[in-house]
Image (tube, rainbow, N blue to C red):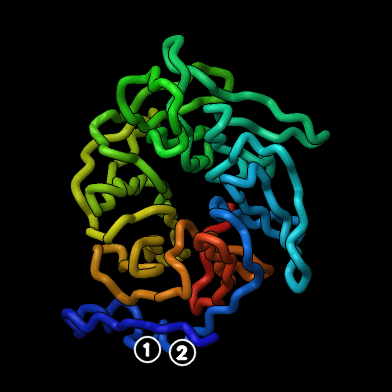
Amino acid sequence: MRCLLLSLACLPVLVAAREPADLFADLKVEQLAADFRFTEGPVWIRDGYWLFSDIPADRIYKLVPGEKPAVWREPSGQSNGLTLDREGRLIACEHQTRRVTRTEPDGTVAVLAAHFEGQAFNSPNDVAVRSDGSIYFTDPTYGLAKRPQETPFKGVYLLRPGREPVLLLRDFDMPNGLVFSPDEKYLYIADTPRGHVRRFDVSPDGTLVGGQVFVRVPNPDGMRMDTRGNLYVAGKDGIEVFAPDGTRLAVVACPEVPANCAFGGEDGRTMLITARKGVYAVRLPIPGIVP
């Protein structure tokens, strides 16, 4: 299935100075699997396979390239965002259980955080891990359903190893996807209803400063970075690609509206896209940052 690439030729001289104008041309998006309920949270596992969430189905699936997906964990706490820590352990944001967990090498699940100041989180959504082991996660109300909202805001949190969560930000409508720049100087956070991605400076102690709007995207969700600092945002129109200065380079339109994406494969150039009921893959010209 051929990917529809919408090249946005604003400031062509500047775009050409960053990446060749045809760098993202002629990409092919392939459907790998279908008939899920709502897919999210893709992550590449170093042993050579993908994991991804199906939130309503309460499952995490394992996808070995060239094979059919298989249930890896059920129940999953209605997991959403997944990533790895620096030791290769799975970190999961769970909607149903309202917690952030870590899967230990023996398969046991350790609860890293479930409350802030004695109040249950809303529904932890997406997660990113800094090189020092610090965990950053967002907590909108998307997975709260009819349960009472104990935390009276939708926050962004920092979880240092062995410590209680620290509230970093509370001025979002719905904080969603988040990703570090390659040098970890910046943390990008999507605010879905407001249709923008904000960029924060990361202080040496891990706190965040600034927060100006970096790019505008219809319904931004999960995000990833490639090794050149280009930002990939899953949104209403597809996977939007932005240069490090915020210039839009391309939009990779998918058969379904994507919720998230992740780099993986042996060379880091395969992107897995979780998009509603389907899972898709596309080979990209630049390797991405893999946890």
Foreground tag (1 vs 2): 2
Furthest-left residue in this view:
11
Tell me which corner region of the image, top left, top right, bottom left or bottom right, holds residue 101. Answer: top right
Q: Nearer the viewer, residue 151 or 28?
A: 151
Q: Position of residue 30 (x, y in %)?
A: 59, 78
Q: Is mark 1 on a helix, strand or loop?
A: loop
- Residue type, mark 1 in image: Asp
How far apart are the two marked residues, 1 and 2, measured between alpha carbons?
8 Å
Furthest-front residue in this view:
146
Image point (30%, 83%), residue name: 7
Disc 1 and disc 2 in contact, CB within 8 angstroms: yes
Image point (54%, 23%), residue name: 113
Image point (63%, 70%), residue name: 267
Q: Which of 71 and 7 is in front in this view?
A: 71
Q: Is mark 2 on a helix, strand or loop?
A: loop
Q: Mark 1 points at which residue?
A: 22
Q: Nearer the viewer, residue 249 or 93?
A: 93
Q: Position of residue 135 (x, y in %)?
A: 50, 34
Task: Using the image, determine if residue 136 lies above or below residue 45.
Answer: above
Q: Bin the neighbour count of mark 1 within 10 Å (Cα to Cα): few under 14, some 14-19, many 20 and up.
A: few
Q: Nearer the viewer, residue 53 or 134?
A: 53
282 left or right of 32 in image? left
Q: Bin the neighbour count of mark 2 within 10 Å (Cα to Cα): few under 14, some 14-19, many 20 and up.
A: few
- Residue type, mark 2 in image: Asp
Furthest-right residue in this view:
106
Task: Using the image, determine if residue 29 lies above or below residue 225.
Answer: below
Q: Is residue 133 visible?
A: no
104 left or right of 125 in image? right
Q: Position of residue 21 (x, y in %)?
A: 32, 86
203 left or right of 82 in image? left
Q: Mark 2 points at which residue?
A: 26
Q: Where is residue 283 in the image (x, y as percent from the top left)?
A: 56, 77
